[in-house]
Every structure is written in C-alpha cells, then in structure tokens.
Image (cartoon, grey):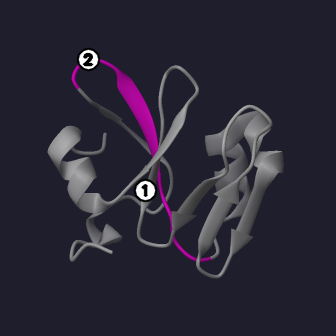
Amino acid sequence: MSESSLSEFPQGAFSAFSTAKMSHFLPIRPNLDPEVLRSFFGADAANIRQTATGLTLRTPDASPLRAKNGEIIARFTNGKYKVMDVDYYRKNFNDPL
C-alpha cells in the first residue's frame, strides 16, 4: 500500500471531477456502514462482501472487484468500477467536492 493514507478524504462516498466527467468515490475503511454501501453501489450492493481487510464486489458481468482497506473505489458514469490507491487518485482526479 502507498505511503499516503485516507486521512484527508471524506469518511463516506464523495464526488470529484476527472478530465471532464464527474465520478463517485468510496474510500475503503473497516466497518463501512451498510447504508453507505447501498448508497454508493445501488443495486450492486447486494453483491458486496465486506471483511476485516476490505470488500469484494461480485457481479455477473464482470470479474470480482477486490478493494483493501486504504484503497478507493471509483464508480464512473458508465457504471464501471475501478480500485485505486491514494497516489493514483491524486494524479488523476481533482480534490473531493
């Protein structure tokens, strides 16, 4: 994991802009509230398995998405997800709104 931490990020889901489009982000921390997961993942929330070390999203149309505590999940406008670390976020996205 990167030397950077999630301490400067909001506790829950947040939005930010990349080059031209708004994306939504969820910093992964232990014991995320189920309502935060439902709000961020929508219908996909039923496919989330949360563990002490992170979470896994399994959907029928994609490979399992695994995110460890300290990483960030992005949800893009096309409905796809991406796991990234704090350094990648800082290089490619603006500050949280």
Judge whether 11 appears above or below 92 on screen: below
Q: Quadrant of residue 10?
A: bottom left
Query: Which stretch appears magenta?
Result: 19-30
Asked whether the viewer can see residue 58, the reply is: yes
Instruction: Determine whether, in the image, residue 75 is placed left or right of residue 96.
Output: right
Q: Position of residue 58 (x, y in %)?
A: 74, 49
Q: Position of residue 67 (x, y in %)?
A: 53, 62
Q: Position of residue 19 (x, y in %)?
A: 21, 23
The C terminus, quarter of image: top left
Q: Residue at 26% across / 17% down in the picture?
A: 20
Amino acid marked by disc 2: Ala
Say which element carries label 2.
loop
Judge whether 26 appears above or below 92 on screen: below
Instruction: Determine whether, in the image, residue 37 is placed left or right of residue 29.
Output: right
Which residue position is annotated with label 2?
Answer: 20
Which residue position is annotated with label 1?
Answer: 72
Q: Nearer the viewer, residue 85 or 14?
A: 85
Q: Position of residue 43 (x, y in %)?
A: 78, 35
Q: How far apart, in angstroms, are the residues tagged by discs 1 and 2?
A: 20 Å
Question: Of marks 1 and 2, which one's residue comes earlier in the chain?
Answer: 2
Amino acid marked by disc 1: Ile
Say which element carries label 1.
strand
Q: Residue at 45% across / 63% down in the picture?
A: 11
The N terminus, quarter of image: bottom left
Dot 1: few (<14), some (14–19), or many (≥20) neighbours within 10 Å?
A: many
